[in-house]
Amino acid sequence: MDQHQEVSSAKVMLILRIAMVALAALLVGCFFLPWGSAIAEFRDAAAQMPEAWFYEPAGLTAADAADLSLVEYAASYQTLEGALRDVYVSIMYAAVALPAIALLFAALGKPVPASIFAVLTLAVTELLRWDFGDRGVLPSASHDWGIAPTVYMVVAIVLIALGIASAVLKHRVKKAKAAAAV
């Protein structure tokens, strides 16, 4: 491998690493984006009575409930009783913990573990999407799907693809250096 190819590969690897860090950070941020978004009728009613309780045990007013992120859903589920509460809350918090670990690995330049945690993030968020739909939580009479489920899916898939591309490039560079050393 000549010096020009080595520099070029190093630049591409740096760009991939920066992109992976940015995407993993976006996955973390998705936890705070709307998972559920109020339909027009609910928004109109909430605008007229913003202080009316939407779900008092979690402290959510109608104004707070216009857009519900997984943060609000997790807080709401924490107020429930029963064994399933901990399962649901854990799965929801996994939707921020797993991308945080992916972010750490991306920042450390470890594309394979970052991709694995992106796959796990995708699995958790798709499980939540299926569960919310199956139980009729979303869409509902007051809310439809927000932007977060779609952003989670798209960003996780792109992060996985970049992780694979980065791992392949790393492998090719190592192989070329080993061949050049012989």
Image (cartoon, rainbow, N blue to C red):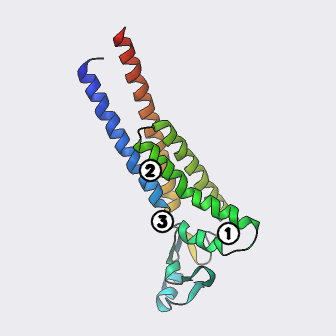
Q: Which amino acid is tagged 3?
A: Phe
Identify the element where label 3 is drawn.
Answer: loop
The first of marks 3 and 1 along the sequence is: 3
Few, some or many C-alpha atoms within 10 Å of disc 3 (few <14, some 14-19, many ≥20)? some
Res. 47 mark: none
Vertical position of residue 65 compared to residue 112: above or below:
below
Relative image position of residue 90 (x, y in whole percent): 64, 60
45 or 86, nearer to the observer: 86
Determine if residue 133 is in view. no
Which residue in the protein does label 3 denote? 32
Residue at 49 percent across and 42 percent down: it is 114
Q: Residue at x 51, y 90 (%)?
A: 51
**Disc 2 marks which residue?**
24
Quarter of the N terminus within the rendering? top left
Which residue is the site of mark 1?
136
Mark 1–mark 2 Cα distance, whole angstroms, equals 30 Å
Q: What residue appears at the point 45 percent right and 37 percent down from the top-left corner? A: 110
Quadrant, the C terminus: top left
Residue 71 location (% of width, % of height):
54, 68
Amino acid on which the number 2 mark rests in the picture: Ala
Q: Nearer the viewer, residue 150 or 70?
A: 70
What is the residue that sits farthest to the right in this orientation? 82
